[in-house]
Image: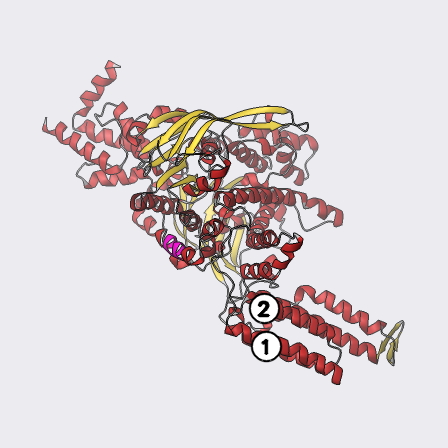
């Protein structure tokens, strides 16, 4: 069940996008998000589509795989589209019972759906092409300026990468404890909400205990290997911009400029 | 009695990631048997035992419990799980209640029994694993590793299953802790006639306790016979990443070195007897007698 | 002084109630003194709860003595300034393979220790290459640890410690959660490191067959050292070991049983060839008479 979630799982293939510096990709994602919110006409969306699908093609991640990642946010997508569809005032197209669909509503719903879809596809593309470690490294470097205002950037990045490392282990553990309790007659499926919530106790208590045990073991293991925070630490794989990154930055700057121009001119 | 007919299990069936964990496994587990299940990690033995109480559903073939298919419509999996008790590896990780006694009551409570019956069963199960009343009100997390393990086993025993399956119940325990748990299992089997299936990596333990061994390799059941016969195939076992007990190798090494001795020994006692037998025939017997009188 | 030395080491686990009052004092280690020479392979045996893991954690300054002193490479572990130096002199491998691998890629995990020590990037790569090779895990360097077997994970953990270039490596029940093949893998790796690289090894375990090649064995019980000696000396005392909740390999047990029945075997036999050789010899003598 939990293994079906594709959102955020690294997709291991060799591609120019995979090889980019994580900071470049983070910046690209940011650019896409901003551009999508600035965009307000069909041409802008056309440009965004060109940009996004261009990167997807270069990343060698199958489109089908990315679309599958949309499943968990499908509800949100439909909900916000419907919201816009029925609640935008304007020129009436169809009317039945209490619902009115307007021309403006139709356009806005369509745009909203496209905007959200592109947003999710763009951000999941980031995680498909970047390992969790690269991602945290990139974040750590990009946000380093926050150290000035005493944000423990290194520690937060370390917590993130450890969390990512332990997710598969805890998923497996959940499955095992669930089965063990089912073998003792526990029932996780039937009954009302309260009964179901109560049935989770035999699963959650052991899971928490195990998570705490792992955390304290891990802390000990890190200490034993001389971990003492980010101070004086060197990197095995320091981040370095290469020619491809410089090129990517040019494209990344050209794209939002284009979107803004399209918005202003058309 | 549990019967498996051509049971197959494929992970992620129908996808390119499809992997076969069980391949056409057919076997019969008769009432009152003490069976050892061996195989290296990933051989399919854990998947196999999870089929026996319906936690994993076969993708092919059929499983019968007392002659009735467990996949028949209307068959109660809950009922099956209380008849076929399964103790997972490191079962102490599933303990969750405030005290030992309440935790052991969890299984029988799920069976929908009366309060008196639940408590009676919990008491009995705890005494079977040698946990005394002074432990009942302790938090399970205060106990030592071996004690926790025994409480967890009691949690399954309290459901009074007809068949008890244990996945490496002695993993991580010290030699004495191991002997205690195996001894208690042997007693359950002997005195209560419980059917016991023991999954183990220790050939020495299996040889000492069980009367039948099933060997899994790459999802197939490759041997299913008495320990003596199975360990006779020690060369094939080695190819599967398994082995025979050390004494079996000693006997073979002796025979090869020109010391005539039975080579089908599987326990230390048998080996001792066999070696003494050879020496006695040669006349060492006299010395042994003299030694015995002197003591 | 040896590489690891403990003098009158006492460690108490203190349990306090809500008001910080001492509720219970549990003496996990009572008055242990030992001296381990550099380059040795030392085993610490003992049943669960005998205090062996508590003792091990003192060798890496993860625990500090309640009383007495522990020196690692001549440094007192209680000295705050030498903490990191102590930890890179004596590296530590733990029991649960899953809970000591920090990174999501094998090679990055091996580089974790050197990164913490501030080793320059090029040097980290050199050490990672060398250590992965030493434990035979080079082929898996880009794998995720989740895809490895238990024995492979422990070898990665060993490489991670080796990359800190310690003089000594302490393994706290590294094989307790592994299957027999994984156990063999790990022990073979550790023995090789000891022989080829001259690393001092302290192996904590309750599996007897893992320690028959040790230079010296300490047996712990109730927080004290109950027995001490070479494998031959220790394994000759089968009945005493059993009283300490331990066991001996089948070959030793068989030889012990035969001796009790009057077969004139040597007092301690540790491997199959030895037993076979002696039995054949005894029989030749008997038949010749």
For the record, the magenta segment spans C126-132
Mark 2 falls on what kind of element? helix
- Residue found at x 57% / y 30%: B126
Between disc 1 and disc 2, whose residue precedes? 2
Q: How many marks?
A: 2
Please determine whether, in this image, residue A221 is positioned above or below residue A243: above
* Dominant secondary structure (helix, strand or loop) of the stretch shown in magenta: helix
- Chain of the residue on which disc 1 is drawn: A
C147 is within the stretch colored magenta: no
- Chain of the residue on which disc 2 is drawn: A
Residue, far top:
B294
Answer whether labels 1 and 2 touch (C-beta < 8 Å).
no
Query: Gap in Å between the C-alphas at discs 1 and 2?
Result: 13 Å
Q: Residue A85 in the image: state x and y as whole percent.
A: 81, 74
Residue at mark 2: A25
- Residue found at x 55% / y 38%: B92
In front of the other: A43 or A118: A43
Residue A1 is at least partly visible in this image: no
Quarter placement of the C terminus of chain C: top left
Residue at mark 1: A250
In front of the other: B244 or A239: A239
Foreground disc of the pair 1, 2: 1
Q: Residue A230 in the image: state x and y as whole percent.
A: 55, 51
């Amino acid at each position: 069940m939990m293994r079906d979630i594709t959102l955020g799982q690294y997709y291991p293939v060799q591609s120019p996008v995979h090889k980019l510096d994580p900071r470049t990709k983070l910046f690209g994602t940011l650019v896409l998000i901003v551009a999508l919110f600035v965009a307000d006409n069909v041409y802008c969306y056309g440009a965004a589509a060109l940009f996004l699908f261009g990167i997807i093609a270069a990343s060698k991640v199958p489109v089908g795989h990315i679309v599958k990642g949309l499943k968990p946010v499908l509800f949100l997508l439909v909900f916000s589209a419907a919201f816009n569809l029925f609640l935008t005032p304007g020129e009436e197209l169809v009317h039945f019972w209490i619902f009115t669909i307007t021309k403006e509503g139709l356009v806005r719903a369509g745009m909203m759906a496209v905007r959200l879809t592109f947003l999710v596809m763009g951000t999941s593309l980031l995680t498909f092409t970047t390992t969790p470690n690269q991602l945290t490294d990139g974040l750590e470097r990009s946000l380093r300026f926050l150290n000035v205002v005493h944000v423990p950037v290194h520690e937060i990045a370390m917590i993130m990468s450890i969390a990512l490392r332990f997710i598969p282990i805890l998923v497996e553990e959940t499955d095992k404890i669930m089965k063990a309790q089912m073998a003792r007659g526990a029932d996780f499926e039937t009954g009302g909400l309260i009964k179901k919530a109560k049935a989770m106790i035999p699963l959650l208590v052991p899971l928490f205990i195990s998570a705490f045990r792992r955390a304290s073991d891990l802390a000990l293991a890190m200490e034993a290997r001389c971990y003492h925070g980010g101070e004086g630490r060197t990197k095995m794989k320091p981040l370095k911009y290469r020619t491809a990154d410089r090129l990517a930055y040019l494209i990344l700057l050209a794209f939002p400029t284009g979107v803004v121009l399209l918005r202003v001119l058309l | 009695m549990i019967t498996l007919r051509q049971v197959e299990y494929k992970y992620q069936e129908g996808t390119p990631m499809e992997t076969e964990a069980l391949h056409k496994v057919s076997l019969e587990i008769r009432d009152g048997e003490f069976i050892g299940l061996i195989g290296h990690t990933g051989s399919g033995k854990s998947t196999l035992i999870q089929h026996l109480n319906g936690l994993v559903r076969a993708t092919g073939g059929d499983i019968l419990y007392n002659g009735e298919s467990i996949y028949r419509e209307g068959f109660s999996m809950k009922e099956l799980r209380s008849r076929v008790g399964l103790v997972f590896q490191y079962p102490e990780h599933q303990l969750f209640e405030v005290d030992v006694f309440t935790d052991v009551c969890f299984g029988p409570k799920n069976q929908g029994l009366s309060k008196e019956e639940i408590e009676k069963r919990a008491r009995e199960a705890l005494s079977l694993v040698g946990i005394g009343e002074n432990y009942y009100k302790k938090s399970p997390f205060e106990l030592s590793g071996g004690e926790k393990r025994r409480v967890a086993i009691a949690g399954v025993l309290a459901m009074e299953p007809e068949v008890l399956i244990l996945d490496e119940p002695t993993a991580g325990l010290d030699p004495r802790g191991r002997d205690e748990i195996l001894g208690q299992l042997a007693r359950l089997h002997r005195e209560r006639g419980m059917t016991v299936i023991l999954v183990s990596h220790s050939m020495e333990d299996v040889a000492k306790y069980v009367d039948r061994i099933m060997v899994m390799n790459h999802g197939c059941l490759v041997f299913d016979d008495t320990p003596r016969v199975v360990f006779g195939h020690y060369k094939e076992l080695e190819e599967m990443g398994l082995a025979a007990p050390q004494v079996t190798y000693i006997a073979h090494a002796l025979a090869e070195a020109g010391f005539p001795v039975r080579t089908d020994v599987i326990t230390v006692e048998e080996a001792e007897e066999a070696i003494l037998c050879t020496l006695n025939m040669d006349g060492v017997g006299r010395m042994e007698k003299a030694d015995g009188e002197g003591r | 002084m040896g590489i690891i030395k403990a003098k009158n080491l006492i460690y108490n686990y203190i349990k306090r109630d809500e008001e910080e009052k001492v509720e219970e004092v549990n003496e996990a280690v009572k008055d242990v003194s030992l001296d381990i020479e550099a380059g040795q392979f030392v085993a610490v045996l003992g049943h669960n709860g005998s205090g062996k893991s508590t003792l091990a954690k003192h060798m890496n300054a993860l625990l500090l003595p309640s009383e007495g002193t522990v020196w690692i490479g001549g440094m007192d572990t209680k000295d705050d300034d030498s903490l990191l130096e102590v930890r890179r002199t004596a590296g530590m491998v733990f029991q649960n393979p899953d809970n000591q691998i920090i990174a999501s890629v094998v090679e990055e995990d091996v580089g974790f220790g050197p990164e913490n020590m501030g080793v320059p990037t090029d040097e980290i790569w050199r050490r990672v290459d060398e250590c992965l090779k030493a434990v035979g895990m080079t082929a898996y360097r880009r794998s995720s640890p989740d895809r490895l077997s238990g024995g492979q994970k422990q070898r990665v953990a060993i490489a991670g410690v080796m990359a800190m270039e310690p003089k000594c490596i302490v393994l706290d029940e590294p094989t307790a959660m592994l299957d027999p093949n994984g156990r063999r893998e790990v022990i073979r790796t550790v023995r090789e490191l000891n022989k080829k690289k001259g690393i001092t090894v302290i192996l904590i375990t309750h599996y007897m067959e893992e320690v028959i090649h040790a230079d010296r064995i300490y047996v712990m019980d109730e927080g004290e050292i109950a027995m001490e000696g070479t494998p031959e000396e220790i394994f000759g005392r089968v009945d005493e070991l059993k009283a300490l909740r331990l066991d001996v390999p089948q070959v030793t047990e068989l030889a012990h049983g035969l001796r009790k029945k009057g077969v004139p075997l040597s007092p301690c036999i540790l491997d199959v060839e030895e037993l076979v050789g002696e039995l054949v010899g005894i029989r030749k003598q008997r038949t010749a008479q």
